[in-house]
Amino acid sequence: MAQQETDPETERQTDRSLTMSRAMVEAIAHEMREDEEVFYMGEDVADYGGIFDSTEGLLEEFGCDRIMDVPISETAYLGAAVGAAQAGMRPIAELMFVDFFGVGMDQIYNQMAKNTYMSGGSVSVPMVLTAAVGGTYNDAAQHSQTLYGTFAHLPGMKVVVPSTAYDAKGLMHNAIRDNDPVVYMFHKRLMGIGWLPAPDGPKTPVPEDDYTIPFGSADVKREGADVTVVTLGLHVHRALEAADDLADDGIDAEVVDLRTLVPLDTETVRESVAKTGRLVVVDEDYRSFGVTGEIVARVAEDGLADLEAVERVAVPDVPLPYARPMENEVVPDAEDITSAVRAAHGDE
Amino acid sequence: MYEAMVTARHYEERLQEEYLEGKQPAFDISAGPIPGELHLAAGHEASGAGVCQHLRDDDTVTAPHRPHHIAVAKGVDLKRMTAEIFGRETGLSKGKGGHMHLFDPDVNFACSGIIAEGCPPAVGAGLAAKKRNTDSVAVAFLGEGAIDQGAFLESLNMAAVQDLPVVFVVEDNDWAISMPKERVTDVENGAQRAGGFDLPGTRVDADDAVAVYEAAREAIGRARDRNGPSLLEVQVHRRMGHFMGDPQAYRSDEDEEAAQQRDSIDRLEADLRAHGVDNETVASLRSSAQERVEEAIEWAKEQPEPEPADAHEDVFTNPPSGVTDSEPNAAKTETGGDD
């Protein structure tokens, strides 16, 4: 797997593999030890350790002043994170399910994301907003959305979406050190929690030392010559599975993991499409006005001549249904990706 | 009231059994006949039964994500509710909603998976009743963890200033997932929230269904008589985890044990016996409740699963002719734009 490190020392091999949640927690713990201004708040993040293990074990080391359980009051605590960040602290605030963003959205998109701009750059908001995203476990429309596009659409937030433990740690270090608001969206299915088994793939070797992965550096998770598959989060793994299947039939798919939506590494995507000529974009967010359309538009703007075929695979514009046959219908799987790649490749 | 309570309890015991099927040996939330989260309300029965006894079908109830006991007490169709929980085509929401999102317009019941977000719609139902000059009322149920939420506080205020026929029922089970209430709320008694809005606020302790019944009679009567909204907090208890599979590592054994000790159903049964209700009557109420539950579960399990393509239906009541999604293999509503 091609990785981009900022610190060559971190390239030393390690046999240690971590789940994505452990990797995230390791980065958070490191930053909290280094900087007393870093603290974490959210619902059930202390004693419970985060519903998706996003803070597992942190209470023990840092105590409840720095790993804070808060009332169920998203407007108040997300806004409090904005205020504390503007006062110079470095809060991490967890929104348990991204679907709950509506409750505190003004604090997210009108305060957290805009105060730097509206102050003419005189105010910075160095906070991280973490949120669990994704379906695949039949929890219906208020607990299964992915919503990458919403946050990436509204200006002023950097948007991070890791797909592996290695990426999760490096991106988290970067997120906490960044002087701007960062929305760090992790897919529940990738975290490695007991009751929601992860696919093979997100558990990777992770260096013990700290390291950062720059925002805006997409990662080619699989090299291929025939079709470029651009995706992120859980669907990196589904795309890799599809690519393995397709390889048996002689179709060589390249899988590009965006890793961050803001900033977006258009260059890596474009270079890949220049090589393959065919683009498939896969996203677990809704199809219209979202990530898939944006990627296609950027490639078309800069490299229309390279484009021989385009396919999009995303959730059609319906809320996530509860029952399994319907959820399976709308959430893309490896088979949907395989079909799209075949279509782009010109196979029937 | 007793019947509603034992029906709800037995219903949840059976749901628990069904839910765990296929999730063993290692608990996998997405496996088995009932996937997704399941929030059981064992220990909450006194509030649903005590309040809903005073409601008619034309009265509106909004419930939170732990809705079954309230739905049972409000008279939601038990078979179709069960089919919904099993994700079947004939479920209340055709399999689209699941257990946190049960809608039964026949008895004006709805619920939401987002904390306190059922309060504003209850205010809206109250507003409609006032505008139409009917005597129907609306009741919003919420947990004690929700009393810090803006949607609840704003709803109290709006109901108060508009004198709307709304009753807010706070179910206090001491826990918001892992957060004990003393750590997130500075008031001991959630009914005190009413004071800030110049509303009557009452608290009923000790899982006492009869006391809930009495307090609810006053609150709902007040709303029905156009005397405005009120707030009722009811002490219930949580006999299990927040959701099925919650290991409850944050909770002491003593607290769990204490919750098991204060059972509203035992309490009501003792009251009934003290008032001369004999064993036979109690046993027959229990067995008819069990039969009803079994019937609902058996019926639900026989129902067909929805077709995958059904996922594309019902986004709109009146589908626009140019639907935004253009997925080539999507099964589109044939009638789109023609009605």
Image (cartoon, coloured by chain):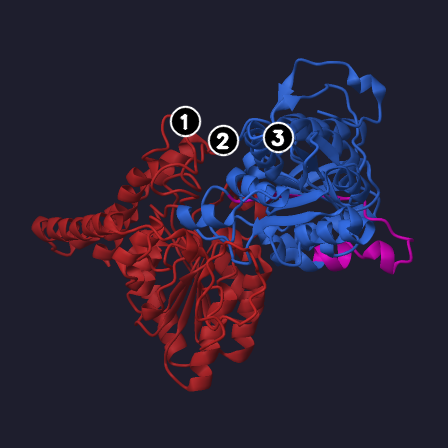
Chain colours: A blue, B red
Q: CA distance from mark 2 to mark 3?
A: 13 Å
Q: Amino acid at mark 1?
A: Ala
Q: Which residues are magenta?
A: A107-135
Q: Which residue is mark 3?
A: A21
Would residue B266 appear left or right of A218 to someone viewing this image? left
Quarter of the figure with residue A279: top right
Q: CA distance from mark 1 to mark 3?
A: 19 Å
Q: Say above or below: B27 vs B276.
A: above
**Do callouts 2 and 1 point to residues on the same chain?**
no
Quadrant holding the C terminus of chain B: bottom left
Indicate the secondary structure of the residue bearing disc 2.
loop
Which residue occupies 86% across, 60% down? A118
Q: Which residue is mark 2?
A: A197
Q: Chain of mark 2?
A: A
In-front residue for pair A13/A208 = A13
Q: Which residue is mark 1?
A: B26
Q: Position of residue B100 (x, y in %)?
A: 42, 53
Q: Amino acid at mark 2?
A: Pro
Q: Say above or below: B314 vs B160.
A: above
